[in-house]
Image: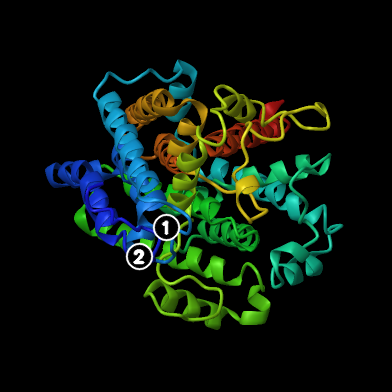
Amino acid sequence: MAAVPSNPQKEGVLFISGMLMSLGLAVAPITAFLRNPRNILRTENIIGLAPIYWLFMDLVTAIYDLPLVDRGAVRLSFLTTGIFVTMFWLATMQKPWKLPKAFMNSCSFRPEVSVILPITIICFVLAMLAYAIPSNFDVMLMFRSILQNRFSAPWARGELGGWDAFIDHLNYFGYLLPTLAVMLMRRKGLMHPATVVGFVLAGIFLLFLMHSGARRIIGVCLGSALIYWVLDRERVRIWQLIASAAAIGAILWVMQGMLVFRTLGVGELGVSNTARIAWESMQGKDAAIGTPKGLAVDDNFFRLTQVLSIVPKAHPHVYWRHIWYVLVRPIPRVFWAGKPMDGGFRLQDFDDKGASLSITVVGEAWLSWGYIAVIFAGWMFGRLSRMNSPLFNASSGSVGPMFYGYVTMMLFVGWRAIQEILLFSYALLGWMLASWIYSKFQSRGPSGH
Protein backbone atom coordinates (compact mmCIF):
# COMPACT_ATOMS: atom_id res chain seq x y z
CA MET A 1 0.00 0.00 0.00
CA ALA A 2 2.86 2.38 0.79
CA ALA A 3 4.37 1.75 -2.66
CA VAL A 4 1.23 3.00 -4.46
CA PRO A 5 2.15 6.28 -6.21
CA SER A 6 0.06 9.41 -5.92
CA ASN A 7 -1.14 8.91 -9.50
CA PRO A 8 -1.74 5.18 -10.06
CA GLN A 9 -3.47 5.55 -13.43
CA LYS A 10 -0.48 5.16 -15.75
CA GLU A 11 0.40 1.71 -17.07
CA GLY A 12 3.22 0.05 -15.15
CA VAL A 13 3.36 2.33 -12.09
CA LEU A 14 1.84 -0.35 -9.84
CA PHE A 15 4.49 -2.93 -10.71
CA ILE A 16 6.28 -2.63 -7.35
CA SER A 17 3.04 -2.84 -5.36
CA GLY A 18 1.85 -5.82 -7.40
CA MET A 19 5.19 -7.59 -7.06
CA LEU A 20 5.37 -7.03 -3.30
CA MET A 21 1.83 -8.30 -2.82
CA SER A 22 2.48 -11.34 -5.02
CA LEU A 23 5.64 -12.24 -3.11
CA GLY A 24 3.82 -11.93 0.19
CA LEU A 25 0.97 -14.14 -1.00
CA ALA A 26 3.42 -16.76 -2.28
CA VAL A 27 5.30 -17.15 1.04
CA ALA A 28 2.99 -19.79 2.57
CA PRO A 29 2.68 -22.03 -0.53
CA ILE A 30 6.44 -21.82 -1.16
CA THR A 31 7.16 -22.72 2.47
CA ALA A 32 4.86 -25.73 2.17
CA PHE A 33 6.61 -26.75 -1.05
CA LEU A 34 10.05 -26.59 0.57
CA ARG A 35 8.90 -28.82 3.41
CA ASN A 36 7.42 -31.36 1.00
CA PRO A 37 7.12 -30.69 -2.77
CA ARG A 38 3.84 -32.62 -2.88
CA ASN A 39 2.25 -30.04 -0.57
CA ILE A 40 2.13 -27.46 -3.35
CA LEU A 41 -0.84 -29.43 -4.71
CA ARG A 42 -2.86 -29.05 -1.52
CA THR A 43 -6.05 -27.17 -2.26
CA GLU A 44 -5.33 -24.40 0.26
CA ASN A 45 -1.91 -23.71 -1.29
CA ILE A 46 -3.32 -23.54 -4.82
CA ILE A 47 -6.17 -21.27 -3.69
CA GLY A 48 -3.62 -19.22 -1.73
CA LEU A 49 -1.94 -18.46 -5.05
CA ALA A 50 -5.25 -17.61 -6.78
CA PRO A 51 -5.21 -13.84 -6.00
CA ILE A 52 -1.79 -13.55 -7.64
CA TYR A 53 -3.27 -14.86 -10.87
CA TRP A 54 -6.69 -13.22 -10.78
CA LEU A 55 -5.70 -9.80 -9.39
CA PHE A 56 -2.00 -8.97 -9.41
CA MET A 57 -0.65 -10.70 -12.53
CA ASP A 58 -1.82 -7.78 -14.64
CA LEU A 59 0.02 -5.32 -12.40
CA VAL A 60 3.25 -7.31 -12.65
CA THR A 61 3.04 -7.70 -16.43
CA ALA A 62 1.74 -4.09 -16.72
CA ILE A 63 -0.64 -4.59 -19.65
CA TYR A 64 -3.13 -1.77 -19.02
CA ASP A 65 -3.63 1.54 -17.27
CA LEU A 66 -6.28 2.43 -14.68
CA PRO A 67 -8.17 5.50 -15.90
CA LEU A 68 -10.16 7.59 -13.42
CA VAL A 69 -8.92 5.57 -10.42
CA ASP A 70 -7.49 7.39 -7.41
CA ARG A 71 -4.81 6.30 -4.96
CA GLY A 72 -7.29 5.67 -2.15
CA ALA A 73 -9.25 3.09 -4.15
CA VAL A 74 -6.05 1.30 -5.19
CA ARG A 75 -4.77 1.13 -1.62
CA LEU A 76 -8.18 -0.09 -0.46
CA SER A 77 -7.97 -2.86 -3.07
CA PHE A 78 -4.73 -4.09 -1.52
CA LEU A 79 -6.18 -3.77 1.99
CA THR A 80 -9.39 -5.69 1.34
CA THR A 81 -7.50 -8.43 -0.51
CA GLY A 82 -5.06 -8.68 2.41
CA ILE A 83 -7.92 -9.00 4.89
CA PHE A 84 -9.60 -11.65 2.74
CA VAL A 85 -6.41 -13.72 2.42
CA THR A 86 -5.60 -13.38 6.13
CA MET A 87 -9.02 -14.77 7.04
CA PHE A 88 -8.55 -17.49 4.41
CA TRP A 89 -5.36 -18.76 6.04
CA LEU A 90 -6.79 -18.52 9.55
CA ALA A 91 -9.73 -20.68 8.44
CA THR A 92 -7.40 -23.32 6.96
CA MET A 93 -5.89 -23.84 10.44
CA GLN A 94 -9.19 -25.21 11.73
CA LYS A 95 -10.27 -28.83 11.57
CA PRO A 96 -11.82 -29.43 8.13
CA TRP A 97 -15.52 -29.96 7.65
CA LYS A 98 -16.46 -33.54 6.84
CA LEU A 99 -17.54 -34.45 3.35
CA PRO A 100 -20.74 -36.54 3.07
CA LYS A 101 -20.06 -40.19 3.81
CA ALA A 102 -21.76 -41.33 0.60
CA PHE A 103 -19.50 -39.03 -1.43
CA MET A 104 -16.37 -40.30 0.35
CA ASN A 105 -17.43 -43.87 -0.35
CA SER A 106 -17.88 -43.08 -4.03
CA CYS A 107 -14.36 -41.59 -4.14
CA SER A 108 -12.87 -44.97 -3.21
CA PHE A 109 -14.35 -46.51 -6.37
CA ARG A 110 -11.60 -48.00 -8.59
CA PRO A 111 -13.08 -48.18 -12.11
CA GLU A 112 -11.66 -50.47 -14.75
CA VAL A 113 -11.06 -49.40 -18.35
CA SER A 114 -14.18 -51.34 -19.32
CA VAL A 115 -16.11 -48.82 -17.20
CA ILE A 116 -14.10 -45.63 -17.82
CA LEU A 117 -14.24 -45.76 -21.63
CA PRO A 118 -18.04 -46.14 -21.95
CA ILE A 119 -18.60 -43.32 -19.43
CA THR A 120 -16.12 -41.17 -21.40
CA ILE A 121 -18.05 -41.82 -24.62
CA ILE A 122 -21.38 -41.02 -22.93
CA CYS A 123 -19.99 -37.74 -21.56
CA PHE A 124 -18.61 -36.83 -24.99
CA VAL A 125 -21.87 -37.52 -26.83
CA LEU A 126 -23.95 -35.56 -24.32
CA ALA A 127 -21.49 -32.63 -24.31
CA MET A 128 -21.31 -32.42 -28.10
CA LEU A 129 -25.10 -32.22 -28.31
CA ALA A 130 -24.67 -28.61 -27.12
CA TYR A 131 -23.14 -27.90 -30.54
CA ALA A 132 -24.85 -30.53 -32.68
CA ILE A 133 -28.46 -29.60 -31.85
CA PRO A 134 -28.13 -25.89 -32.83
CA SER A 135 -26.30 -27.04 -36.00
CA ASN A 136 -29.10 -29.49 -36.86
CA PHE A 137 -26.53 -32.30 -36.54
CA ASP A 138 -24.62 -30.99 -39.57
CA VAL A 139 -21.10 -32.15 -38.69
CA MET A 140 -19.43 -30.17 -41.48
CA LEU A 141 -21.21 -26.99 -40.37
CA MET A 142 -20.01 -27.58 -36.81
CA PHE A 143 -16.35 -27.82 -37.83
CA ARG A 144 -16.62 -24.87 -40.24
CA SER A 145 -18.11 -22.79 -37.44
CA ILE A 146 -15.16 -23.26 -35.08
CA LEU A 147 -12.92 -21.62 -37.73
CA GLN A 148 -15.03 -18.46 -37.63
CA ASN A 149 -15.58 -15.92 -34.85
CA ARG A 150 -17.53 -17.08 -31.83
CA PHE A 151 -20.53 -14.82 -32.42
CA SER A 152 -21.41 -16.31 -35.82
CA ALA A 153 -21.62 -19.92 -34.65
CA PRO A 154 -25.07 -21.61 -34.64
CA TRP A 155 -24.77 -22.25 -30.90
CA ALA A 156 -24.13 -18.59 -30.02
CA ARG A 157 -26.96 -16.90 -28.13
CA GLY A 158 -27.72 -13.78 -26.13
CA GLU A 159 -27.20 -13.13 -22.44
CA LEU A 160 -30.62 -14.41 -21.39
CA GLY A 161 -31.64 -17.83 -22.66
CA GLY A 162 -34.99 -19.57 -22.97
CA TRP A 163 -35.35 -23.26 -23.64
CA ASP A 164 -31.97 -23.16 -25.41
CA ALA A 165 -30.36 -22.72 -21.99
CA PHE A 166 -30.97 -26.43 -21.38
CA ILE A 167 -28.85 -27.20 -24.45
CA ASP A 168 -26.01 -25.06 -23.08
CA HIS A 169 -26.00 -27.10 -19.88
CA LEU A 170 -25.04 -30.20 -21.86
CA ASN A 171 -21.58 -28.65 -22.10
CA TYR A 172 -20.89 -29.54 -18.48
CA PHE A 173 -20.75 -33.25 -19.30
CA GLY A 174 -17.48 -32.64 -21.14
CA TYR A 175 -15.54 -30.83 -18.44
CA LEU A 176 -14.11 -34.08 -17.04
CA LEU A 177 -13.15 -35.52 -20.45
CA PRO A 178 -9.43 -34.51 -20.21
CA THR A 179 -9.22 -36.08 -16.75
CA LEU A 180 -10.93 -39.24 -17.96
CA ALA A 181 -8.45 -39.45 -20.84
CA VAL A 182 -5.56 -39.16 -18.39
CA MET A 183 -7.21 -41.82 -16.24
CA LEU A 184 -7.25 -44.18 -19.23
CA MET A 185 -3.60 -43.42 -19.88
CA ARG A 186 -2.69 -44.17 -16.27
CA ARG A 187 -4.45 -47.55 -16.51
CA LYS A 188 -3.33 -48.79 -19.93
CA GLY A 189 -0.50 -46.56 -21.15
CA LEU A 190 -0.32 -43.77 -23.72
CA MET A 191 -0.62 -45.88 -26.89
CA HIS A 192 -3.43 -48.19 -25.81
CA PRO A 193 -6.49 -47.91 -28.14
CA ALA A 194 -8.76 -46.90 -25.23
CA THR A 195 -6.35 -44.10 -24.29
CA VAL A 196 -6.13 -42.87 -27.88
CA VAL A 197 -9.94 -42.78 -28.11
CA GLY A 198 -10.13 -40.89 -24.82
CA PHE A 199 -7.64 -38.21 -25.91
CA VAL A 200 -9.28 -37.84 -29.34
CA LEU A 201 -12.70 -37.29 -27.78
CA ALA A 202 -11.27 -34.86 -25.21
CA GLY A 203 -9.36 -33.00 -27.96
CA ILE A 204 -12.45 -32.60 -30.15
CA PHE A 205 -14.49 -31.27 -27.25
CA LEU A 206 -11.75 -28.84 -26.22
CA LEU A 207 -11.61 -27.45 -29.77
CA PHE A 208 -15.27 -26.49 -29.57
CA LEU A 209 -14.86 -25.25 -26.01
CA MET A 210 -11.92 -23.04 -27.02
CA HIS A 211 -14.06 -21.48 -29.75
CA SER A 212 -16.30 -19.94 -27.07
CA GLY A 213 -13.35 -17.91 -25.79
CA ALA A 214 -14.03 -18.95 -22.18
CA ARG A 215 -10.43 -19.29 -21.05
CA ARG A 216 -11.29 -20.08 -17.44
CA ILE A 217 -13.18 -23.23 -18.53
CA ILE A 218 -10.19 -24.47 -20.50
CA GLY A 219 -8.01 -23.75 -17.47
CA VAL A 220 -10.27 -25.76 -15.16
CA CYS A 221 -10.56 -28.74 -17.55
CA LEU A 222 -6.83 -29.00 -18.23
CA GLY A 223 -5.76 -28.01 -14.72
CA SER A 224 -7.95 -30.74 -13.21
CA ALA A 225 -6.41 -33.34 -15.53
CA LEU A 226 -2.92 -32.13 -14.60
CA ILE A 227 -3.54 -32.38 -10.84
CA TYR A 228 -4.98 -35.85 -11.31
CA TRP A 229 -1.94 -36.95 -13.33
CA VAL A 230 0.37 -35.94 -10.48
CA LEU A 231 -1.66 -37.25 -7.53
CA ASP A 232 -2.73 -40.58 -9.05
CA ARG A 233 0.47 -42.27 -7.85
CA GLU A 234 1.98 -43.37 -4.59
CA ARG A 235 4.89 -40.88 -4.66
CA VAL A 236 5.26 -37.49 -6.32
CA ARG A 237 8.71 -36.79 -7.72
CA ILE A 238 10.37 -33.51 -8.59
CA TRP A 239 10.48 -34.27 -12.32
CA GLN A 240 6.68 -34.65 -12.31
CA LEU A 241 6.27 -31.23 -10.72
CA ILE A 242 8.71 -29.74 -13.25
CA ALA A 243 6.72 -31.34 -16.07
CA SER A 244 3.55 -29.93 -14.51
CA ALA A 245 5.06 -26.44 -14.43
CA ALA A 246 5.89 -26.76 -18.14
CA ALA A 247 2.33 -27.95 -18.80
CA ILE A 248 0.95 -24.93 -16.95
CA GLY A 249 3.04 -22.69 -19.20
CA ALA A 250 1.59 -24.45 -22.25
CA ILE A 251 -1.95 -24.03 -20.91
CA LEU A 252 -1.37 -20.30 -20.39
CA TRP A 253 -0.07 -20.11 -23.97
CA VAL A 254 -3.22 -21.81 -25.27
CA MET A 255 -5.38 -19.43 -23.23
CA GLN A 256 -3.46 -16.46 -24.60
CA GLY A 257 -4.07 -17.81 -28.11
CA MET A 258 -7.80 -17.97 -27.37
CA LEU A 259 -7.70 -14.28 -26.56
CA VAL A 260 -6.07 -13.63 -29.93
CA PHE A 261 -8.46 -15.55 -32.19
CA ARG A 262 -11.79 -15.37 -30.35
CA THR A 263 -12.85 -12.18 -32.13
CA LEU A 264 -11.72 -12.90 -35.71
CA GLY A 265 -11.63 -16.69 -35.68
CA VAL A 266 -8.71 -19.06 -36.10
CA GLY A 267 -9.72 -19.68 -39.71
CA GLU A 268 -8.83 -16.10 -40.66
CA LEU A 269 -5.63 -15.88 -38.62
CA GLY A 270 -4.34 -19.42 -39.05
CA VAL A 271 -3.14 -21.75 -36.31
CA SER A 272 0.59 -21.01 -36.66
CA ASN A 273 0.02 -17.26 -36.85
CA THR A 274 -2.23 -17.37 -33.78
CA ALA A 275 0.39 -19.34 -31.84
CA ARG A 276 3.12 -16.87 -32.83
CA ILE A 277 1.08 -13.81 -31.87
CA ALA A 278 0.15 -15.40 -28.54
CA TRP A 279 3.78 -16.20 -27.75
CA GLU A 280 5.05 -12.76 -28.68
CA SER A 281 2.29 -10.99 -26.77
CA MET A 282 3.11 -13.02 -23.65
CA GLN A 283 6.63 -11.60 -23.89
CA GLY A 284 5.25 -8.05 -23.77
CA LYS A 285 5.51 -7.28 -27.49
CA ASP A 286 2.95 -5.48 -29.64
CA ALA A 287 2.35 -8.59 -31.71
CA ALA A 288 -0.88 -7.42 -33.35
CA ILE A 289 -3.50 -4.72 -33.03
CA GLY A 290 -5.91 -5.47 -30.21
CA THR A 291 -3.76 -8.10 -28.50
CA PRO A 292 -2.53 -7.50 -24.95
CA LYS A 293 1.09 -6.91 -24.01
CA GLY A 294 2.03 -9.51 -21.44
CA LEU A 295 0.23 -12.49 -19.97
CA ALA A 296 -3.40 -11.42 -20.01
CA VAL A 297 -5.79 -12.60 -17.32
CA ASP A 298 -8.66 -10.13 -16.92
CA ASP A 299 -8.76 -6.52 -15.85
CA ASN A 300 -10.01 -7.68 -12.45
CA PHE A 301 -7.83 -5.36 -10.39
CA PHE A 302 -9.10 -2.35 -12.33
CA ARG A 303 -12.71 -3.50 -11.88
CA LEU A 304 -12.16 -4.09 -8.17
CA THR A 305 -10.87 -0.55 -7.70
CA GLN A 306 -13.93 0.74 -9.57
CA VAL A 307 -16.30 -1.12 -7.24
CA LEU A 308 -14.47 0.18 -4.18
CA SER A 309 -14.77 3.71 -5.60
CA ILE A 310 -18.49 3.38 -6.32
CA VAL A 311 -19.76 1.41 -3.31
CA PRO A 312 -21.01 2.76 -0.97
CA LYS A 313 -20.31 6.36 -2.10
CA ALA A 314 -22.41 6.31 -5.28
CA HIS A 315 -24.30 3.02 -4.81
CA PRO A 316 -25.38 1.34 -1.56
CA HIS A 317 -24.31 -2.16 -0.53
CA VAL A 318 -26.59 -4.83 -1.99
CA TYR A 319 -26.42 -7.05 1.14
CA TRP A 320 -28.05 -10.46 0.43
CA ARG A 321 -29.21 -9.67 -3.11
CA HIS A 322 -26.01 -10.82 -4.78
CA ILE A 323 -25.79 -14.18 -2.99
CA TRP A 324 -29.49 -14.75 -3.68
CA TYR A 325 -28.87 -14.06 -7.37
CA VAL A 326 -26.08 -16.67 -7.35
CA LEU A 327 -28.13 -19.29 -5.51
CA VAL A 328 -31.13 -19.09 -7.85
CA ARG A 329 -28.94 -19.09 -10.97
CA PRO A 330 -29.63 -22.80 -11.76
CA ILE A 331 -33.41 -22.24 -11.97
CA PRO A 332 -34.33 -21.92 -15.69
CA ARG A 333 -35.83 -18.55 -16.56
CA VAL A 334 -38.56 -20.28 -18.57
CA PHE A 335 -39.87 -21.60 -15.24
CA TRP A 336 -39.37 -18.31 -13.37
CA ALA A 337 -39.78 -15.29 -15.60
CA GLY A 338 -39.19 -12.93 -12.69
CA LYS A 339 -35.87 -14.45 -11.67
CA PRO A 340 -33.36 -11.71 -10.72
CA MET A 341 -31.31 -10.53 -13.69
CA ASP A 342 -28.45 -9.32 -11.50
CA GLY A 343 -27.39 -9.08 -7.89
CA GLY A 344 -28.50 -5.50 -7.42
CA PHE A 345 -25.43 -3.93 -9.03
CA ARG A 346 -24.06 -3.86 -12.58
CA LEU A 347 -20.62 -2.40 -13.01
CA GLN A 348 -21.23 -1.96 -16.74
CA ASP A 349 -23.87 0.65 -15.83
CA PHE A 350 -20.99 2.80 -14.53
CA ASP A 351 -18.63 1.87 -17.37
CA ASP A 352 -18.72 2.22 -21.15
CA LYS A 353 -18.57 -1.56 -21.69
CA GLY A 354 -21.76 -3.49 -22.29
CA ALA A 355 -20.39 -6.90 -21.37
CA SER A 356 -20.50 -8.34 -17.88
CA LEU A 357 -17.38 -7.56 -15.88
CA SER A 358 -15.81 -9.78 -13.22
CA ILE A 359 -14.66 -8.15 -9.98
CA THR A 360 -13.37 -11.25 -8.08
CA VAL A 361 -14.81 -12.65 -4.88
CA VAL A 362 -13.26 -9.76 -2.92
CA GLY A 363 -15.22 -7.23 -4.97
CA GLU A 364 -18.42 -9.26 -4.65
CA ALA A 365 -17.97 -9.45 -0.89
CA TRP A 366 -17.35 -5.70 -0.59
CA LEU A 367 -20.35 -5.07 -2.80
CA SER A 368 -22.51 -7.15 -0.47
CA TRP A 369 -21.59 -5.79 2.95
CA GLY A 370 -18.18 -4.12 3.01
CA TYR A 371 -15.55 -5.29 5.49
CA ILE A 372 -17.94 -7.70 7.25
CA ALA A 373 -18.58 -9.66 4.06
CA VAL A 374 -14.89 -9.59 3.08
CA ILE A 375 -13.96 -11.16 6.43
CA PHE A 376 -16.70 -13.79 6.18
CA ALA A 377 -15.99 -14.66 2.53
CA GLY A 378 -12.28 -15.10 3.22
CA TRP A 379 -13.04 -17.40 6.15
CA MET A 380 -15.54 -19.39 4.07
CA PHE A 381 -13.05 -19.90 1.24
CA GLY A 382 -10.53 -21.22 3.74
CA ARG A 383 -13.05 -23.67 5.18
CA LEU A 384 -14.08 -24.89 1.71
CA SER A 385 -10.44 -25.37 0.73
CA ARG A 386 -9.72 -27.51 3.79
CA MET A 387 -12.88 -29.57 3.28
CA ASN A 388 -11.23 -31.11 0.21
CA SER A 389 -8.15 -32.27 2.16
CA PRO A 390 -9.29 -35.88 2.93
CA LEU A 391 -9.09 -36.58 -0.81
CA PHE A 392 -5.47 -35.37 -1.02
CA ASN A 393 -4.19 -38.78 0.03
CA ALA A 394 -6.82 -40.80 -1.84
CA SER A 395 -5.44 -44.10 -3.06
CA SER A 396 -4.08 -44.22 -6.60
CA GLY A 397 -6.39 -45.92 -9.05
CA SER A 398 -9.54 -44.55 -7.38
CA VAL A 399 -11.64 -41.63 -8.58
CA GLY A 400 -10.65 -39.69 -5.45
CA PRO A 401 -7.76 -37.82 -7.15
CA MET A 402 -10.10 -36.92 -10.04
CA PHE A 403 -12.64 -35.32 -7.71
CA TYR A 404 -9.84 -33.66 -5.73
CA GLY A 405 -8.32 -32.04 -8.81
CA TYR A 406 -11.64 -30.84 -10.16
CA VAL A 407 -12.91 -29.41 -6.86
CA THR A 408 -9.57 -27.65 -6.39
CA MET A 409 -9.80 -25.99 -9.79
CA MET A 410 -13.46 -25.21 -9.18
CA LEU A 411 -12.50 -23.22 -6.09
CA PHE A 412 -9.58 -21.63 -7.93
CA VAL A 413 -11.84 -20.25 -10.65
CA GLY A 414 -14.37 -19.38 -7.93
CA TRP A 415 -11.92 -16.66 -6.89
CA ARG A 416 -12.90 -14.88 -10.11
CA ALA A 417 -16.63 -14.99 -9.28
CA ILE A 418 -18.64 -16.88 -6.68
CA GLN A 419 -21.14 -18.11 -9.25
CA GLU A 420 -18.38 -20.09 -10.99
CA ILE A 421 -18.34 -22.55 -8.07
CA LEU A 422 -22.01 -23.27 -8.62
CA LEU A 423 -21.75 -23.55 -12.39
CA PHE A 424 -18.69 -25.81 -12.41
CA SER A 425 -20.30 -28.13 -9.86
CA TYR A 426 -22.67 -29.24 -12.63
CA ALA A 427 -19.85 -31.34 -14.09
CA LEU A 428 -19.82 -33.49 -10.96
CA LEU A 429 -23.55 -34.06 -11.40
CA GLY A 430 -22.80 -34.91 -15.03
CA TRP A 431 -20.33 -37.61 -13.93
CA MET A 432 -22.96 -39.11 -11.63
CA LEU A 433 -25.60 -39.06 -14.38
CA ALA A 434 -23.25 -40.59 -16.96
CA SER A 435 -22.31 -43.32 -14.47
CA TRP A 436 -25.98 -44.00 -13.84
CA ILE A 437 -26.73 -44.21 -17.58
CA TYR A 438 -23.87 -46.67 -18.02
CA SER A 439 -25.08 -48.81 -15.12
CA LYS A 440 -28.56 -48.97 -16.68
CA PHE A 441 -27.17 -50.08 -20.05
CA GLN A 442 -24.92 -52.62 -18.36
CA SER A 443 -27.79 -54.08 -16.35
CA ARG A 444 -29.65 -54.84 -19.60
CA GLY A 445 -26.82 -56.99 -20.86
CA PRO A 446 -26.55 -60.78 -20.47
CA SER A 447 -24.99 -60.42 -17.01
CA GLY A 448 -27.88 -58.24 -15.88
CA HIS A 449 -30.62 -60.82 -16.46
Where the C terminus falls, by quadrant? top right
- Residue at image coords 44%, 16%: 101
**Of residues 412 and 297, the one drawn nearer to the viewer in this rendering:** 297
Picture coordinates of residue 5 (x, y %)? 28, 56
Q: Secondary structure at mark 2?
A: helix
- Residue at image coords 71%, 53%: 128
Q: Is residue 259 left or right of residue 354?
A: left
Name the residue that disc number 2 marks: 61
On the question of residue 296 being in view, the answer is yes
Residue type beneath disc 1: Gly
**Of residues 213 and 343, the one drawn nearer to the viewer in this rendering:** 343
Name the residue that disc number 1 marks: 189
Q: Is residue 297 left or right of residue 142?
A: left
- Residue at image coords 56%, 55%: 198
Question: Marks 1 and 2, how far apart in space?
Answer: 39 Å
Residue type beneath disc 2: Thr
How many numbered circles are shown? 2
Picture coordinates of residue 151 (x, y %)? 74, 63
- Residue at image coords 71%, 29%: 340
Q: Which mark is residue 25?
A: none
Q: Secondary structure at mark 1?
A: loop
